[in-house]
Amino acid sequence: MSELKVFHLPGRWDLKSVSPFCLKLDAFLRIADIPHHSITASTPFGGPKNKAPWVEIEGEIMGDSSLIIERLKKVYQVNPDDHLSSEERGIAVAIERLVEENLYWVMVYDRWCRTENWATLKDSVLGDIPQPLRAMLAPYARRSVKKQLAGHGMGLHSHAEICAIAQRDISALSDFLAAKSYFFGDRPSLTDATVYSVLANIYAVPFTSPMKTMLEQAQNLLPFITRFKAEYYGDDTAQ
């Protein structure tokens, strides 16, 4: 079998990638123990869908983290969810959708729309794009992201409404995790990789966000982040 090549956006702040979707795929690869060659891309435009991550697998280039993971499960005959019941698998999909289709967009709003975060974003998320190209692309990228936020619907809400949405999602995650080590017990699953990838990109970053206080007040979600990172990134000097 040819070498699996995984392309992801740059890492910052002791995280493998500033992109939750790239970080999710990386975390899945670690849980599943799939050997691969990790390649950093400064922009997502090299991928087949103009999004990151993307992979080269069996001579084919493919994008979308969820589709990639489903392909990897079949090719490498691994499934971190194989210990889940059918009911738990249904719940897992619901949690993953909550995180990736809702809470993620609150994170995007905080990064791209809050004036106090703009300077940090330009020098970090866009930091691998060389100047003066970065200065020219940054305003275009920001307008594009704001259009995406509006298209999703999150960008149409007031600041207070967005905060309320985030609080409901974070409370739901905390309530379901409860006193468990991982979302479905003592063994991690794709759900844990998905939740970790977004929560770490909310809390372990130098962006202003009311969600940081929400995570602290939840009490069990920060220990979850620490636990997952220690288990799968503890020996990684280039996280």
Image (cartoon, rainbow, N blue to C red):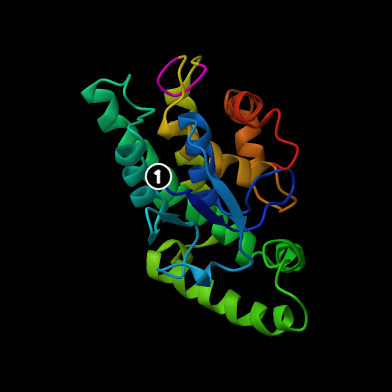
Q: Is residue 170 magenta?
A: no
Name which quarter of the figure residue 19 lies in: bottom right
Instruction: Give coordinates of residue 132: x percent, y percent.
Output: 77, 84
Nearer the observer, 150 or 34: 34
Name which quarter of the figure residue 185 lies in: top left
Q: Which residue is mark 1?
A: 1
Residue 60 lies left or right of residue 228; in this view the side is left
Q: Which residues are magenta?
A: 181-185
Split into 4 quadrants, where in the image is the N terminus? top left
Q: Residue at x 47, y 65 (%)?
A: 51
Instruction: Give coordinates of residue 95: x percent, y percent.
Output: 37, 37
In the picture shown, does residue 238 fall above or below 54? above
Magenta span main SS: loop
Split into 4 quadrants, where in the image is the C terminus? top right
Nearer the observer, 143 or 167: 143
Tag count: 1
Confirm whether residue 160 shows in the render: no
Name which quarter of the figure residue 233 lies in: top right
- The residue type indicated by label 1 comes to Met
Q: Residue at x 58, y 76 (%)?
A: 141
Instruction: Give coordinates of residue 175: x percent, y percent.
Output: 45, 25
Label 1 Cα crowd, 10 Å radius (few <14 / some 14-19 / many 20+): few
Confirm whether residue 13 shows in the render: yes
Nearer the observer, 162 or 103: 103
In the picture shown, does residue 107 fall above or below 30? below
Residue 15 lies left or right of residue 191; in this view the side is right
